[in-house]
Amino acid sequence: MSQSTPHPALRRLPLIVILIVAVAGAFYLRDYLTFQALADNREALLGFRDANYVLTVLAFIAAYVVIVAFSLPGATIATLTGGFLFATFPGALFNVIGATLGAIIIFQAARWGLGEKLAAKMEASDGLVKRIKDGIDANQWEMLFLIRLVPAVPFFVANLVPALVGVPLSRFAITTFLGIIPGGVVYTSVGAGLGEVFARGETPNLGIIFEPAILLPILGLCALAALPIVIKALRGKKGL
């Protein structure tokens, strides 16, 4: 007995819900998920954490998952909050877990609604489209790490593109978790120092990731991720 195939509209429903919530969140939450809101509520947050540490950890990770899964504004503020509440470690771990779980949700929604069908069409095509698909398939690990490590690639884009080209879930999850660690640690460490920033009445330096001492090591990791792609390309040319 064959299983019935869900209607295309039903398969797209999770992605449609995400898009609707994302648009609504951009309008209604942009004034709440801000650095100023964190500053205004810092004492209450610290008090709640001290009284309910485990509950605070679980609630924080759940909130981070929702922010990422629905592409809501405030992901950077959430990362800073993780450092502010839990220090660089384990704050960075909580941030990375929340971001990875949220990324998996939107990846699955996009793949279920669009990705599987699009990937099948690309696989069945010929010419340039097929060559692009084959090139991505031949370097999936490297490409996935690159889009996570390069600071210029928006997180939302890095969640959607793999879903549209047929990347396996396990590969996506592993590269997301590991690939966002460098940037996650940097911003979590900024959040860990927010107590002093609040005391001075200042705002944190969110451009720190582009400073040479931070950016150059990350670019070095990008070069390592890209090296296998370059080697394969050079070997391919020699074989011609």
Image: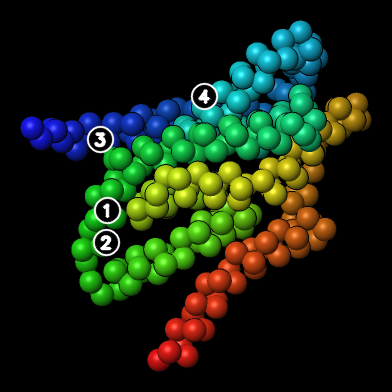
- Mark 2 crowd level (few <14, some 14–19, many ≥20, 10 Å Cα): many
Question: Going by the image, does 164 lie left or right of 232?
Answer: left
**Numbered tag placed on residue 118 in the rendering:** 1
Relative to 210, does residue 12 appear above or below in the rendering? Answer: above
Tag 1 secondary structure: helix
Tag 3 secondary structure: helix
x and y, in percent, of residue 109 in the image: 36, 37
Identified at 78% across, 55% down, the residue is 214
- Residue indicated by mark 3: 11
- Mark 1 crowd level (few <14, some 14–19, many ≥20, 10 Å Cα): some
Q: Residue 13 versus residue 203: which sits nearer the camera?
A: 13
**Distance (Cα) linking label 3 and label 1:** 13 Å
Identified at 72% across, 10% down, the residue is 52
**Residue lying furthest front:** 1
> At label 1, which amino acid type do we have?
Leu
Q: Are marks 3 and 2 in contact (CB under 8 Å)?
A: no
> At label 3, which amino acid type do we have?
Arg
Which of pointers 3 and 1 lies earlier in the amino acid sequence? Answer: 3
x and y, in percent, of residue 178 in the image: 61, 48
**Distance (Cα) linking label 3 and label 2:** 19 Å
> At label 2, which amino acid type do we have?
Met
- Residue indicated by mark 4: 28
- Mark 4 crowd level (few <14, some 14–19, many ≥20, 10 Å Cα): few
Question: Going by the image, does 12 lie left or right of 100?
Answer: left
Question: Going by the image, does 178 lie left or right of 102?
Answer: right
The C terminus: image quadrant: bottom left
**Distance (Cα) linking label 2 and label 4:** 38 Å
Q: Are marks 4 and 3 in contact (CB under 8 Å)?
A: no
